[in-house]
Amino acid sequence: MIRRLVIRDLALMDRAELEVGPGFTVVTGETGAGKSVLLGALSLLAGNRAAKTIVRKGAEECSVEAELEIAGDPRFAEVLRSLDLPACDDGLLILKRSVHGTKAGRISVNGGAATLTQLQQLGELWIDFHGPGEPQKLMRAETQQEMLDLHAGLASPLAAYRAGWRQRHELIRGAEEAATAERLSEDEEAFLRSQLEKLDGLDLSEEAIAKLERDHARASRAQELAALLGQLEAGLGSDGLGEVFPKLLKAGDDVARIDAEAAALRDRLNSLAAEAEDLRGDFARLGRGLSAEEEATAGLDAQMNRWLEFRRKYGPGVEAVREKREALRRRLAAQGDVEARVAKLKAEAAKVEQELRKHAEVLRTARLKAAEKLAAAARKMLGALGFKKADLRIAVTAADLGPQGADAVRFLFCPNAGQDLLPLDQIASSGEAARVMLALKTVLAAVDRTPVLVFDEVDANVGGEIGAQVGRELAALGAGHQVFCVTHLPQVAALGHAHLVVTKSQDDRSTTVAIAPVHAKRKERESELARMLGDRNSKVALSHARELLAGAK
């Protein structure tokens, strides 16, 4: 869930910092006050595209930052790892995005630079929008199938099916490669075999290549190192300090015999001579080690030259060279018996496909059963939400074998009696779609894994008891999700666990928007509900507001 949200210079808002809690949060304000600013901020963090005109007038850029608690959900760690983005610390996902008025904007995830596409992929995990102008996931066939599969509890069977689907795809690809490969001449085959033999002679692991490059770099400067070691040995030995020290040591002894206080200095001189001799011996051993490595150096040169040759041909890195080696191996293997290999691969693919079709039948049976139950539960919930004569059906029809099975899933909807059932995206208005999604989300609440849900205009064209029921369902949904709802209905607003009020102030020179929580301030919340009821100064409206809040407990 979102724990903290910071907005700067977005539209008419200069700055807002909100500490957000779990449950159901309502957002209210006068028409035109700027309630959409909050939705816009969340939309930016979800990775939706934005025009530069959203930057507040007079500012260079706008920015939005959020802290999300995602502890206990392994999906985020998996996606961050696949996108090569920094991992979360302490179970917090930190998202930041800025839009500049004239330059490119910036996006960061957990402090690391990210792209808009990466932000969108993360957004698919943590937030759903339901309202006008926002991505309508419910309208997509793949989302409808995901909801049905979620209700049917098909996570494990689908994972097994998809593994088989990938295996079949690889077999078919191998058969196509083998069938379309050109026959090699004797010279071409001999050349490829020699290349593969050389490649097999190299250890192409990342660690081995890194060690080869290090060892070669050291060995390539062996002559320079030997010359320097020779200079040091000579300087410390008979050609240098070794010739001088005996005379110095004798003079030190003589001084110590004359002046007893010089004995300590004489001892230090003796220690210096011994240390110099030890150093000479150690440098000499290094030099002898270089001599022992001369034969190895020739082998290193050959290995390094071979690696550089293949990196230049097939690089730029170890992975690319390894891929080329495997491609050469497959190319040569294909020479043996192309027709037999193609036939074998096709037979294996056909065998896997037979198993897949059995799995697909199991999936279809489960989907058909779940479709009846989900549609019935959704119809019942839609009736409570004001669709007295609405109908919703889930059609599961046969389709070509695909990565999710062999079914096409479509949600069919009819909001009024006497109308035909049509695909949801062809008949539902934004407000209707939001209430349909509310009904489905409520039914799927126990298994739905999207933590943050945002509803806009979910209460459009309803009021009274239906509005109160919409509010109760949203509040119930807040038991397992963090729910935000922009509403004009006091019946809904009174049921929020948290209440944010958006206000707009203006003078002759500027207009600003502010957003502030009122759920902890009883009088202010009563006043806002009274305003929504018609008049914040009316005693009747204030009394009604108190009744709504009392009934919401």
Image (cartoon, rainbow, N blue to C red):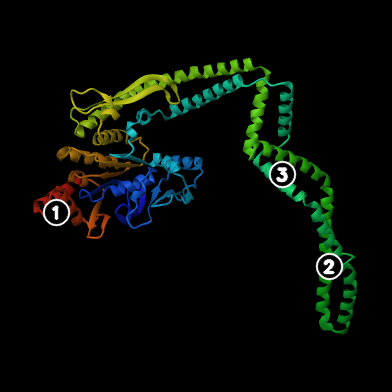
- Residue 369: image quadrant is top left
Q: In the rendered image, which residue does mark 2 sit on?
A: 274
Nearest the viewer among 360 and 197 is 197
Q: Compute the Cα span from label 1 to label 3.
A: 79 Å
Q: Residue at x 63, y 40 (%)?
A: 317
Q: Give the residue type at disc 2.
A: Ala
**Marked residue nearer the N-terminal end (1 or 2):** 2
Q: Residue at x 38, y 46 (%)?
A: 45
SS at mark 3 in the image: helix
CB contact under 8 Å: marks 1 and 2? no
Which x, y percent locates residue 70?
Answer: 41, 45
Which x, y percent locates residue 533?
Answer: 14, 48
Q: Give the residue type at disc 3.
A: Leu
Q: Residue furthest bottom?
A: 259
**Marked residue nearer the N-terminal end (1 or 3):** 3
Rendered position, 279 above or below 540: below
Q: Compute the Cα span from label 2 to label 3.
A: 38 Å
Front label number (2 vs 3): 3
On residue 212, which mark appears?
3
SS at mark 1 in the image: loop
